[in-house]
Each structure stands twice: as C-alpha cells, then as structure tokens.
Amino acid sequence: MPGKLFLSAVVSFCAASLVVAASAATPAETQKIRHEHYEELGEAFKSVRDLTKASTPDFAALEKAADTVHKASIDQQQWFPKGSGPEAGKTRALPEIWTKPEDFLAAQKMFSDRAPKLLAAAKAKDVAAVTAAFREVGGACKNCHDNFRSPEE
Ligand code: ASC
C-alpha cells in the first residue's frame, strides 16, 4: 500500500534526521564536552585513590569509579574528531593529536590496555592490586599529557 510505504519512509527519514541532529555538535561544543568528560574522568580517578586509603574501603563506590575510568578509556577514542583542535577555540589539546594520529592512538591504547586491570582489581576487592593498577593507569595519563597536552598557563 503506497500510503503506508510513504508514511514509513517519512518516519525513517525523521528518525535518521534526529540521529544526525544529536551527533552534530559544533567544534566548540565538542571541545566543551571533551573537557567535561576529562573532568569526570579525573574525579573518578581521584576517588579511586581516595577510596583505597580508607581502612575499610567502600568497594561498591570503588568499583563504580573504576568502571567510569574504564569506560572513559574506551570512549576517549571518540573525543577528538578532526576540527576540534586549537583551530576551534582555546584548548590544551596539541595539534600533534591530529598530525600524528598513530602516536596518539598508541597513547590512548596505553590507557585502554591498563584500565581493565584497575576495574578487575576493584571487582576483586583487592586493595593492593587497585593501588598497583592505579599507578599504571596514572602512567598512561601522564604519558599522554606529556606528549599531547600543552602545559597549564
Ligand atoms: C590524576 C589526574 C591526572 C592524572 C595524572 C597522572 O589524578 O587528574 O590527570 O592523575 O596526573 O600522572
């Protein structure tokens, strides 16, 4: 029935437009959202450290924080689309992110390779393993900051 077919085409078109609209952030918005993602990651990472310092750690909170860190380690590969560098506004993200994409991906992979260990240690309620994994993940944070982020002004 052509009427029904037309209606379903209209519905699909609208649905597709919604998807496009949802992902069409301006470069400045992309920078802002990226910044917020890293703030959230930093908070979660610091809470992992703080939670392990308690004599009786809150393991549920620890696992939640480690999970946030782990998810960010995967998601961050989507946070640097072309055009969201210094040309789009004030950012500490260095141009090398886009001019040396293989090196940047390797730095991101260092993080996503190490984060699962942190989550596993939190799930196992193994404080010593969390502390060790925290240090390793922190090394991946630092490696990327040293090579792909400009110093604070
Ligand atoms: C943190 C935080 C970072 C990393 C980094 C590790 O807690 O906010 O960016 O650790 O300093 O070297």
Image (tube, helix red, strand yellow):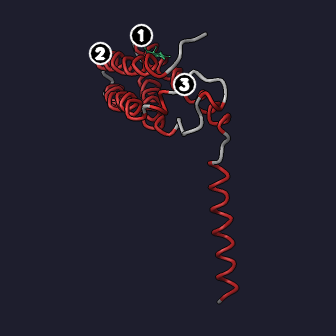
Quadrant (top left/top right/bottom left/bottom right) for the N terminus: bottom right
Q: Residue at x 65, y 75 (%)?
A: 9
Label 1 and label 3: CA atoms lie apart by 32 Å
Residue 45, position in %: x, y?
A: 47, 21
**Which element carries disc 3, helix, strand or loop?**
loop
Tag 2 residue: 128
Label 2 and label 3: CA atoms lie apart by 33 Å
Closer to the camera, 146 or 18? 146
The tag earlier along the polypeptide, 2 or 1, is: 1
Quadrant in the rendering for residue 51? top left
Closer to the camera, 47 or 87? 87
For badge 1, the amino acid type reads Lys
For badge 3, the amino acid type reads Ala
In the image, the residue with mark 1 has its CB under 8 Å from the nearest atom of ligand 1: no
Q: Residue at x 29, y 15 (%)?
A: 128
The tag earlier along the polypeptide, 2 or 3, is: 3
In this view, 137 is above or below 10: above
Q: Residue at x 59, y 34 (%)?
A: 84
Tag 1 residue: 53
Quadrant (top left/top right/bottom left/bottom right) for the C terminus: top right
